[in-house]
Image (cartoon, rainbow, N blue to C red):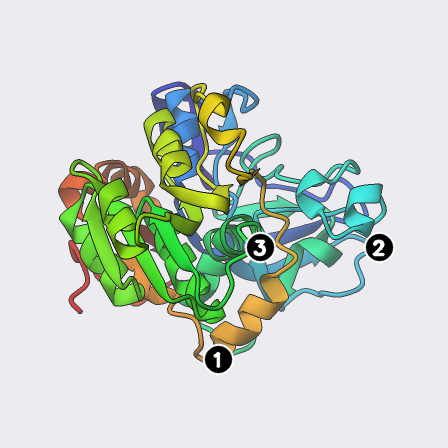
Amino acid sequence: MKGFVFHGPGQSAWQDIPDPALKDPTDAVVRVDAVTICGTDLHILKGDVPDVRPGTVLGHEAVGEIVEVGGDVRTVRPGDRVLVSCISACGRCRFCRESAYGQCRGGGGWVLGHLIDGTQAEYVRVPHADLSVHVLPSTVGNEDAVLLADIFPTSYEVGVLNGQVRPGDTVAVVGAGPIGLAAIATARLFAPERIVAVDPAAARLEAAKRLGADAVADAREDPEQLVADLTDGLGADVVIEAVGLPESFEACTRMVRPGGHVANVGVHGKPAVLHLEDLWIKNVTLTTGLVDTSSTPTLLRMAAAGRLPTADLVTHTFPMNHMEEAYDVFGRAADTGALKVVLGDLPHREVAVRAA
């Protein structure tokens, strides 16, 4: 079979690799029908995630069909169409018992495309299958479902829930890429007074408006002043960092009101300064986190009911064997207008930015 293999910073290839096989009785092997590329994959290719060893198949999001299960797997069987979660969970360790699956100490957590071969291949071995895949209803298509493997639960849990968005809040989302857009869509579930999106790209700001942002600001101008103007100088109740750069993180801490929340979602490859000389007196709550995906069943039900604009984030689709081209398009998002790129068994189309 073929898969997309990381060979070191700046080096990767779609190439022949061995077929996966069951290693533990809790494993499943899934035939991959659809995958997507995550911003974290780009961080890996830049060398920002040194835990990923050369030779690893990338990818941690997929939709596919179970083809084989180990003897201890009870919740799925061959032929089931499933969502492969970005997080695996042993179900037995302290953290899994607290539904903090991202911190699993029993061989789970973020392992796919990180510590073991991932989903950007024709087949993938999924550990701890009982808690790491979700059977899909027939009403949820591949293009919608694959976005529930990572970006929607990540934005919802690490951004919206950690940020404690409440009715009537002003929410600022810094970064209108896929994570930021999913944060806008899920923040709306809590009826905030307004959502402000901040990004340097006009196309992404337009997408933010379509997903529910009430105001947008060019990050190169003065978004902090816009937030101040909208809140009578108070600042945003919740600021969600969805970029992963020191300057965007520091801007978030200046944008939040006293007693407010800064929820960092972005993956940082460099240190960011925490200005405690300014923040110590403001009672600001700062949260970080790796997604647990404990919300995936809820989000999946909402998608099945048509309550989540999942596929609205997809701007480009490709056949699976066009992986290198898809990475190029996604990696040059400023030029291509790419938001979310999906590969596999889909109604193929390719557009720069989806029309409103």
Amino acid type for the residue under numbered disc 3: Val
Residue labelled with disc 1:
139
Q: How far apart are marks 1 and 3 (CA)?
A: 17 Å
Considering the numbered disc 2 on the image, is that residue within a helix, a strand or a loop? loop
Q: From this view, report whether residue 16 is shown above or below residue 38.
A: above
Q: Which comes before the other along the chain, label 2 or label 3?
A: 2
Residue at 27 percent of width and 41 percent of height: 224
At a point 36% along the width and 49% down the height, the residue shown is 173
Label 1 neighbourhood size at 10 Å, few (<14), some (14-19), many (20+)?
Answer: few
Q: What residue type is labelled 2?
A: Asp
Secondary structure under tag 1 reads loop
What residue sits right under mark 2 in the picture?
A: 72
In the rendered structure, which disc, 1 or 2, sits on the residue that comes first in sequence?
Answer: 2
- The quarter of the rendered structure image containing the C terminus is bottom left
Q: Closer to the observer: label 2 or label 3?
A: 3
Q: Nearer the viewer, mark 1 or mark 2?
A: 1
Quick check: 48 left or right of 251? right
Q: Position of residue 38 (x, y in %)?
A: 41, 43
* Residue that numbered label 3 is attached to: 84
- Number of numbered discs on residues: 3
The answer to whether any part of residue 142 appears in the image is no
Q: Distance between the residues labelled 2 and 3?
A: 18 Å
Q: Is tag 1's residue or tag 3's residue first in the polypeptide sequence?
A: 3
| Position of 181 relative to 79 (above/below) | above
Between the residue at mark 1 and the residue at mark 2, the CA separation in whole angstroms equals: 29 Å
Residues at marks 1 and 2 touching, judged by CB atoms closer than 8 Å: no
Q: Is residue 295 left or right of residue 235?
A: right
Q: Which of 124 and 36 is in front in this view?
A: 36
Place of residue 196 in the rendered image (x, y in percent of width and height, measured from the top left):
30, 55
